[in-house]
């Protein structure tokens, strides 16, 4: 019986050691996963900061281009204004030409002998 108790004690010790080793392996695996997750989170945070900096740079470039475009290019309202102004000038020119042709007609009628 003492022999059986000794084997039971050895079995209990072996079981406790096995549980301790399994727990240590589990904990080391968990620690590795935690470390990998922290590393990935840090890398993702860094990529997020880089993306935000790139967005800020692009916004600055866009606002600079918008100011340049406002100065260099004609917008729709400016184009309408130019068209209206030129149409008015052409109407004035047309009226002036009508007046000139009428005066020329009167001058020619007064200078040419009638039938």
Image: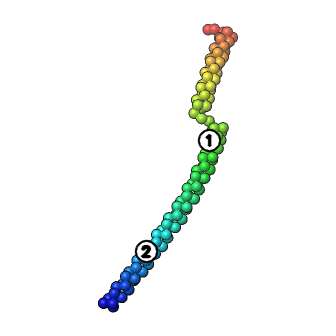
What percent of the width, then of the height, locates residue 1? 30, 90
The alpha-carbon separation of the residues under discs 2 and 1 comes to 63 Å
The residue tagged 2 is: 23
Q: Residue at x 37, y 82 (%)?
A: 12
Q: Circle 1: is it few (<14), some (14-19), or many (20+) Cα within 10 Å?
A: few
Residue 69, by quadrant, is top right
Residue 11 drawn above or below residue 54:
below
On the question of residue 101 being in view, the answer is no
Residue 6 drawn above or below residue 41:
below
What percent of the width, then of the height, locates residue 33? 48, 68
The colour mode here is rainbow
What percent of the width, then of the height, locates residue 13? 40, 82
Q: Residue at x 46, y 75 (%)?
A: 24
Residue 53 drawn above or below residue 42:
above
Q: Residue at x 61, y 22 (%)?
A: 88
Query: Which element carries disc 2, helix, strand or loop?
Result: helix
Q: Circle 2: is it few (<14), some (14-19), or many (20+) Cα within 10 Å?
A: few
- Callout 2–callout 1 Cβ contact below 8 Å: no
Query: Which element carries disc 1, helix, strand or loop?
Result: helix
Q: Nearer the viewer, residue 82 or 67?
A: 67
Q: Residue at x 36, y 88 (%)?
A: 6
- Of badges 2 and 1, nearer the viewer stands 2
The residue tagged 1 is: 66
What percent of the width, then of the height, locates residue 106? 65, 11
Q: Earlier in the sequence, mark 2 or mark 1?
A: 2
| Tag count | 2
Residue 94 drawn above or below residue 9:
above
Q: Nearer the viewer, residue 3 or 60?
A: 3
Residue 102, by quadrant, is top right
Placement of the C terminus among the 4 image quadrants: top right
């Amino acid at each position: 019986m003492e022999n059986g108790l000794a084997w039971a004690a050895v079995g209990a010790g072996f079981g406790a050691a096995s549980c301790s080793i399994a727990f240590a392996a589990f904990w080391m695996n968990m620690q590795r996963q935690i470390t990998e997750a922290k590393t990935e989170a840090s890398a993702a945070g860094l990529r997020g900061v880089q993306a935000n900096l790139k967005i800020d740079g692009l916004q600055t470039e866009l606002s600079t281009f918008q100011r340049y475009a406002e100065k260099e290019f004609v917008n729709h309202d400016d184009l309408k204004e130019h068209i209206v102004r030129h149409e008015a000038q052409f109407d004035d020119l047309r009226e002036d030409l009508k007046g000139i042709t009428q005066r020329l007609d009167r001058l020619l009628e007064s200078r040419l002998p009638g039938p």
